[in-house]
Image (tube, rainbow, N blue to C red):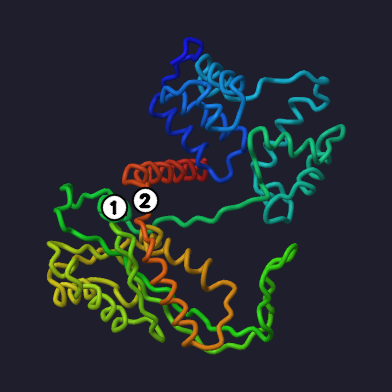
């Protein structure tokens, strides 16, 4: 390494933070670029190599490398710039943030959530002086607070939620009941996507053209609906599918039987089959049926409200975006043929999903939920 290149050594936590910034789809360009510079410096690359790889100047690579070496993650922030003194007092800024962090109903305002103009009107009514909408948004962005956005969530009602989810997460990491999986063990992820409608548009769909997106007629004629049953091999990424008229025990059992007849599953020591709690594979009865039909199969249910643990859901999101939407099929036969053709095409280049969520991540989440519940209980008691 050239003498002028400042050495950089990252801790595990710093490396994790910088990798998230480098991979984040919503990370600002400048933050992603700085993260990539530091990650490359940690690998011992000289400034010239970093600059060439990222298409930046050596001075920029040298500057952010040096700032990180001197001040860590804090050094990757922009330095304060000169400008006129602030016209909005710290008290007004704090009041704006405090109001944004309350639900409108708490303050007596009949809104579901704040919008920028509504929040500004409430603030200026309570504070002397004026504040522009741009200034308000800048103040909230400094924290950051976005009260006009919301995200839904659901509380895990299963008392054994973490224990049951950990079984699946451990499987994805290559362990079962505390022991590493045996050579030849397989993991399958099954689920159904019901009620996929065949909608024929009243007019033909127009392809994209320069300056014009694909155009789809809004009105359509319904030709019925079918279900897509699918199983994913977690280790290979290959998908097995069928398109019955509806979901149920029989279609599910038939698809599993087709898969289990293949030598790699029929002769496997154990085949772990991950399913949710749908009616076609619910409860102990489904476990007993599976064991009777396939003695080497172990059926594992996700906890209630935890279908996101089932990797086949990722494939369903892919097929929804690439095949089902915007939905223009003249018949159920055409819909079925298209779905199965996509599965075949997908399998030609299939790769396993890079699943990163672990049992440790889940435990941390459950701790945060528990702390939140305790704080809420204390506030109610007070």
| Mark 2 / mark 1, whichever is N-terminal | 1
In the picture, measured across the screen, residue 281 lies left or right of residue 372, that is: left
In the picture, measured across the screen, residue 263 lies left or right of residue 6, that is: left
Q: Nearer the viewer, residue 273 or 300?
A: 273
Q: Quadrant of the N terminus?
A: top left
- At mark 1, the secondary structure is helix
Residue in view at x 56 percent, y 27 percent: 51
Name the residue beneath numbered marker 1.
172
Position in image of residue 30 (x %, y %): 62, 33
Position in image of residue 194 (x %, y %): 44, 77
In the orientation shown, which residue stands out farthest toward the right?
Answer: 129
Q: Residues within 10 Å of mark 2 (few under 14, many from 20)?
A: few
Name the residue beneath numbered marker 2.
355
Q: Nearer the viewer, residue 219 or 113?
A: 219
- 140 vs 74: above or below: below
**Res 243 → quadrant:** bottom left
Position in image of residue 163 (x %, y %): 27, 52
In the picture, measured across the screen, residue 182 lies left or right of residue 346, that is: left
Residue in view at x 29 percent, y 74 percent: 281
- 2 and 1 marks in contact (CB < 8 Å): yes
- 7 vs 343: above or below: above
Position in image of residue 251 (x %, y %): 31, 82
Q: Residues within 10 Å of mark 1 (few under 14, many from 20)?
A: many
Counting labels gives: 2
Separation of marks 2 and 1 at Cα, in angstroms: 7 Å
- 7 vs 92: above or below: above
Residue 301 appears in view: no
Residue in view at x 40 percent, y 84 percent: 246
Residue 186 got which mark? none
């Amino acid at each position: 390494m050239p003498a002028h290149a400042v050495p950089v050594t990252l801790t595990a936590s710093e490396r994790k933070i910088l990798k998230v910034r480098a991979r984040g789809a919503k990370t600002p360009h400048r933050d992603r670029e700085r993260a990539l510079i530091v990650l490359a410096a940690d690998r011992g690359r000289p400034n010239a190599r970093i600059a060439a790889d990222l298409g930046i100047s050596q001075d920029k690579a040298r500057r952010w490398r040096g700032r990180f070496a001197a001040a860590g993650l804090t050094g990757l922030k922009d330095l304060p710039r000169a400008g006129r003194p602030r016209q909005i007092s710290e008290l007004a800024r704090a009041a704006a943030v405090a109001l944004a962090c309350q639900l409108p109903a708490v303050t007596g305002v009949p809104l579901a959530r704040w919008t920028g103009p509504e929040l500004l009107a409430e603030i200026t009514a309570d504070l002397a002086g004026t504040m522009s909408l741009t200034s308000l948004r800048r103040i909230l962005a400094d924290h950051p607070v976005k009260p006009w956005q919301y995200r839904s969530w659901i509380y895990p009602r299963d008392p054994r939620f973490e224990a049951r989810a950990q079984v699946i997460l451990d499987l994805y990491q290559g362990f079962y009941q505390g022991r590493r999986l045996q050579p030849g063990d397989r993991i399958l992820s099954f689920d159904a996507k019901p009620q996929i409608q065949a909608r024929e548009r009243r007019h033909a769909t127009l392809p994209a053209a320069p300056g014009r997106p694909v155009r789809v007629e809004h009105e359509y004629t319904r030709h019925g609906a079918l279900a897509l049953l699918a199983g994913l091999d977690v280790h290979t990424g290959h998908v097995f599918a069928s398109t019955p008229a509806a979901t149920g025990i029989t279609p599910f059992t038939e698809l599993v039987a087709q898969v289990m007849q293949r030598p790699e599953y029929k002769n496997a020591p154990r085949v772990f089959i991950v399913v949710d709690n749908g009616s076609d594979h619910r409860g102990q009865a489904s476990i007993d049926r599976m064991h009777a039909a396939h003695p080497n199969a172990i059926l594992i249910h996700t906890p209630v409200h935890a279908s996101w643990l089932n990797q086949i859901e990722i494939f369903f999101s892919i097929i929804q975006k690439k095949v089902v939407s915007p939905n223009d099929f003249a018949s159920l036969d055409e819909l079925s043929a298209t779905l199965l053709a996509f599965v075949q095409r997908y399998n030609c280049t299939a790769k396993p999903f890079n699943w990163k969520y672990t049992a440790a991540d889940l435990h941390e989440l459950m701790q945060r939920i528990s702390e939140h519940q305790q704080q809420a209980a204390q506030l109610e008691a007070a």
